């Protein structure tokens, strides 16, 4: 039996970060899956006599390490599988290089589509990133003040000078917003993991009923796609089951 490609991977949340079971857990698929890594190992204790090679061995602790890379960035895998915390409706959007020329020493930015101003990310005097300096009051040339709600005030000497404003706005009725809370150590969110491959009528199905994730990696690159990566470990469930392996041959 030979298989080709990355296969398909699903996770089903079982327990959140506070130790509570999900009443109606929602399975999700790792979209645009790039690869899945499975690394099962045992510690081994070897018994030696006076000769070069061991005469016996004893198997010790075991470990199943799992790894998944997937290019579809959906917030559900991160909220349920990694953080074990809930998201709410909300979408924060960053606007870059909003160009304006202060008239009467002030500019008020207007977020699009009725969104609410969320945070200022600074003002620049050119597209190369030269910053203007934020001050509390009475700005001089090259300085500005902001009320945190979208209003910017500049020095009279800078009236008519082109500036570049970066800021964030938020919409409450679209998207998903996860705020990661600082929770007590010890409790760990868990989920089950199902992996499937099919080729030429042959089937391979792997299931881990109790999985935790210890690492999430996000890396952006110029001229490349962002591909998140999750590192996971398979544990025994309450029935003592760790892994189910089903294959056509």
Image (tube, helix red, strand yellow):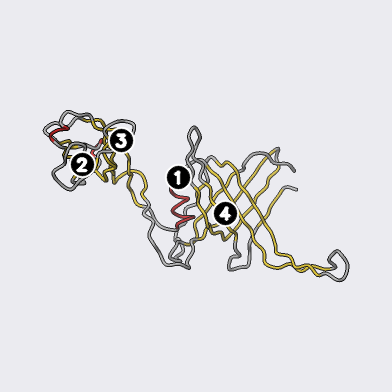
Q: Between tags 3 and 2, which lies in front?
A: 3
Q: Nearer the viewer, mark 4 or mark 3?
A: 3
Q: Where does residue 219 sit, x and y in percent of width and height?
A: 49, 43
Q: Nearer the viewer, residue 93 or 172?
A: 93
Which of the marked residues, 3 or 2, is nearer the chain's N terminus? 3
Q: Earlier in the sequence, mark 1 or mark 2?
A: 1
Which of discs 4 and 2 lies nearer the camera? The answer is: 2
195 relative position to 17: left or right: right
In the displayed structure, does residue 210 sit left or right of residue 91? right
Q: Is residue 237 above or below residue 140?
A: below
- Above-or-below relation of 182 to 69: below
Which residue in the protein does label 2 denote?
A: 150
Q: Residue at x 87, y 70 (%)?
A: 50
Q: Which residue does the numbered mark 3 point to in the structure image?
A: 130
The residue where tag 4 is placed is 193
Label 1 to label 4: alpha-carbon separation: 17 Å
Instruction: Measuring from the top left, give residue 49's x and y in whole percent.
Output: 86, 71
- How packed mark 2 is, by other alpha carbons closer than 10 Å (few <14, some 14-19, many 20 or more), is some
User: In the rendered structure, are the residues bearing label 4 and label 2 in contact, judged by CB atoms less than 8 Å apart?
Assistant: no
Q: CA distance from mark 1 to mark 2?
A: 30 Å
Q: Earlier in the sequence, mark 3 or mark 1?
A: 1
Mark 3 Cα shell of 10 Å, populated few (<14), some (14-19), many (≥20): few
Expressed as whole percent of the image width and height from the top left, the position of residue 141 reads 18, 36
């Amino acid at each position: 039996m030979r298989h080709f490609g990355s296969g398909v991977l699903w996770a089903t949340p079982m327990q959140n970060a506070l130790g509570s079971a999900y009443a109606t857990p929602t399975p999700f698929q790792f979209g645009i899956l790039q690869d899945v890594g499975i690394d099962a190992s045992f510690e081994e204790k070897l018994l030696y006599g006076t000769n070069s090679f061991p005469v016996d061995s004893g198997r010790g602790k075991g470990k199943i390490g799992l790894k998944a890379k997937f290019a579809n960035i959906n917030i559900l895998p991160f909220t349920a599988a990694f953080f074990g915390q809930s998201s709410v409706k909300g979408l924060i959007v960053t606007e870059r290089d909003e160009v304006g020329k202060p008239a009467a020493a002030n500019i008020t930015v207007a977020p699009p589509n009725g969104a609410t101003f969320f945070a200022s990310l600074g003002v620049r005097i050119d597209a190369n990133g030269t910053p203007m300096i934020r001050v509390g009051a009475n700005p001089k040339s090259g300085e500005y003040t902001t009320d945190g709600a979208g209003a910017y005030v500049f020095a009279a000497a800078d009236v008519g000078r082109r500036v570049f404003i970066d800021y964030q706005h938020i919409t409450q009725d679209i998207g998903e917003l996860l705020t990661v809370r600082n929770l007590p150590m010890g409790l760990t969110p868990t989920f089950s993991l199902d992996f499937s491959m099919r080729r030429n009528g042959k089937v391979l199905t792997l299931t881990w009923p109790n999985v935790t994730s210890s690492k999430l990696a996000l890396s952006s690159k110029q001229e490349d796609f962002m591909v998140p990566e999750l590192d996971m470990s398979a544990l025994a469930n309450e029935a003592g089951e760790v892994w189910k392996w089903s294959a056509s041959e």
